[in-house]
Image (tube, rainbow, N blue to C red):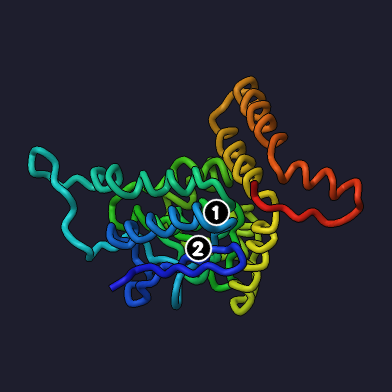
Amino acid sequence: MAKAKYELENGVALITLSDPATLNAISVEMTAELDVFFDRAASEARCIVLTGEGRGFSSGANLASGAPPMDADGKPDLGGRLEATFNPFVTKLRDLPIPYVTAVNGAAAGIGCSFALLGDIIVASESAYFLQAFRRIGLVPDGSATYHLPRMIGRVRAMEMMLLGEKIHAKQAYDWGLVNRCVPDAELLPTARALALELASGPTKTLGMIRRLAWSSLDNNWDEQLNAERHAQKIAGRTEDFREGVQAFFQKRPAEFKGS
């Protein structure tokens, strides 16, 4: 049975985690489906929205989906599963060539929290919450959480989330700067879709470069980042969208970007 759904409308790919019986717990099988869908969206869409079906976004890793892999000594190796499946996927989310919006309903726990917080624009329903649940079962945060959380909300708050394992409800997440919007539950998907449509109507090739520059800034020094900007601007200045944007500016009309 499929664990994810895909639909494309008006340039926006809506990808849905679809295993509501487990609160969309993330398995290797689900991640493989998501991997295919994100590749498809990158080739045919201009923006992606990721959400969860049912009562929650994701309860985290599916602990009932099979025994962990073993290392050469016959000992459990959860790190091997990260290396083979989850680390490549979250890296794909980071490196997407188009904007990525997440619409977070209910629980976003464990690695599901990472999937949600890797969005460029993060929309949370009022009933949503974010949970670094790993410490409750004796594991360390993964899915890039130890990388992106301190950079998003600072070391102190990131430590609070990861060490205490307490729920961070949507309003608090908004106050902390962890999400971009906190909206009534009924407005979650409409809000996310509206933002995605705005992004999809923009110069999406350039937007993809903007998101890559933002990510690279987390690791680059000053000179490296200025050089990355220079290189990206060289490419952006040769796009059809740049020519259209300049013409539209002088003609005092809305630009009609094509993503090229």
- N-terminal label among 2 and 1: 2
Q: Quadrant of the N terminus?
A: bottom left
Residue 125 appearing in the image: yes
Could you tell me the amino acid type at mark 1?
Answer: Gly
How many numbered marks have been drawn onto this rendered protein structure? 2
Q: Residue at x 61, y 79 (%)?
A: 186
Q: Residues within 10 Å of mark 2 (few under 14, many from 20)?
A: many
Q: Secondary structure at mark 1?
A: loop
Front residue of this view, candidates 230 and 249? 249
Residue under label 2, please give it: 50
Q: Secondary structure at mark 2?
A: strand
Front residue of this view, candidates 178 and 3? 3
Relative placement, left or right, of 7 versus 34 is right
State the image coordinates of residue 163 (x, y, percent, origin top left).
42, 49
Residue 110 appearing in the image: no
State the image coordinates of residue 82 (x, y, percent, origin top left).
30, 46
Q: Residue at x 49, y 71 (%)?
A: 106
Could you tell me the amino acid type at mark 2?
Answer: Leu
State the image coordinates of residue 24 (x, y, percent, origin top left).
37, 69
Relative placement, left or right, of 174 versus 242 is left
Residue under label 1, please give it: 119
* Vertical comparison of 147 with 43: above or below: above
Relative placement, left or right, of 97 versus 69 is right
Q: Image quadrant of residue 189? A: bottom right
* Vertical comparison of 106 with 149: above or below: below
Disc 2 and disc 1 in contact, CB within 8 angstroms: yes
Q: Image quadrant of residue 236? A: top right
